[in-house]
Amino acid sequence: MSSEGSALSTRLAIITARQVAGRDICLLTLQAEDGAPLPPATPGAHIDVHLPDGRSRQYSLLSSAPYTIAIKAVRDGRGASQWLHDTLSVGDTIRIGTPRNNFGLREGATDTVLLAGGIGVTALLCMYDALVAGGHTVCLHYWARSVEETFLHAQLSGRPGLHIHACGGRVTSMAAVIAEHGPQADLYCCGPTRMLAEFTALTQGRDPSTVHIERFEADSAAMPEASDEGFSVRLARSGTTIAVGKDQSILEALTDAGVDIEYSCEEGLCGACEVRLLEGDPLHRDSVRTPDEHDQRRTIMLCVSRARSGTLVLDL
């Protein structure tokens, strides 16, 4: 099955500006190809960018008016980011999705701490800007490998409450930063897998509602093992029952049956395929929400989640 994603809510966008923003990092400004206003987005939102070969990748919006995203070329990765970085120029068009936000700011926080590693700072800068503009207390700590690899180093340096820790000298640790803030602080973290694992360990015991993570790749270490058994899903609106094979995702079974589902990453990262779960015992395996959050919302991600047994009833 390809990763091209659903076309239910995509549109063509034209690149109106391109800026070098650090080593192997470009900043792209987008507007709708037809000139219409692009959908609004809240701080922490991301969009899907669809490649011509059918793949898609998620990029945080640094701004929603106009849309601005940053692409870092990962030279030893799977090639998508490198292609986007090296190929796209002003005047080119790309297909993008409607903004989604699985990393939104919690209302009512009195102390907000943003912790970024590498290109993960792009998920947090829009939050920082919104909080500063609203007169709220906020600090952003940004760890980068070097000054050359720091995103927009000259523009960010010296901004109030924004601390850049470039490797090579004495660097403040994440543990020290978290220890400075009491249990009432809201902590947001986005960065490489190793950083997120450290953040998770350092925040054990805090109120889960104050701990927020945005991931670039699935957290395989925390993903529960799936059963080798198949199961069924029933679509409540149509009454249709569809079998899901042991080597098949719910999403694959539904699309193979002709059900029109919005999806994108197929890795449990983007949240596009989240639907309401009406009945059944699910095995949540995504990296977007915790099982408790899914239980409270009564939702499931179709691309990676399974059933512990029997049948799941979906609001479809």
Image (spheres, rainbow, N blue to C red):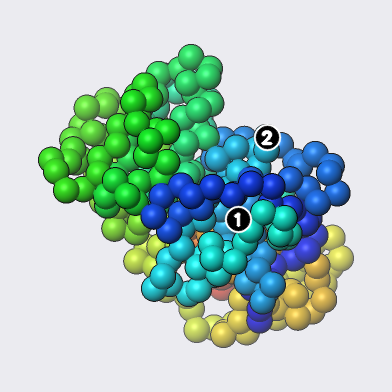
Query: Is 85 in front, or is 52?
Result: 85
Q: Residue at x 25, y 44 (%)?
A: 166
Q: Residue at x 14, y 43 (%)?
A: 169
Q: Is residue 81 left or right of residue 232?
A: left
Query: Is 45 in front, or is 76?
Result: 76
Between marks 2 and 1, how big is the CA–CA gap? Answer: 23 Å
Q: Looking at the picture, how far across and down is residue 142, in whole percent?
A: 33, 40
Q: Tell me the quarter of the image containing the C terminus.
A: bottom right
Q: Is residue 36 left or right of residue 268?
A: right
In which image quadrant can residue 174 be found? Answer: top left
Q: Which amino acid does the dot numbered 1 rest on?
A: Gly
Q: Residue at x 43, y 66 (%)?
A: 74
Q: Which residue is mark 2?
A: 65
Q: In terms of secondary structure, where does tag 1 sit?
A: loop
In which image quadrant can residue 90 be found? Answer: bottom right
> What's the mark number on residue 271?
1
Q: Which amino acid does the dot numbered 2 rest on?
A: Ala
Q: Residue furthest top?
A: 135
* 6 shown above or below 149: below
Q: Looking at the picture, how far across and down is residue 157, in whole percent?
A: 34, 31
Q: Is residue 64 visible?
A: yes
Q: Is residue 316 visible?
A: no
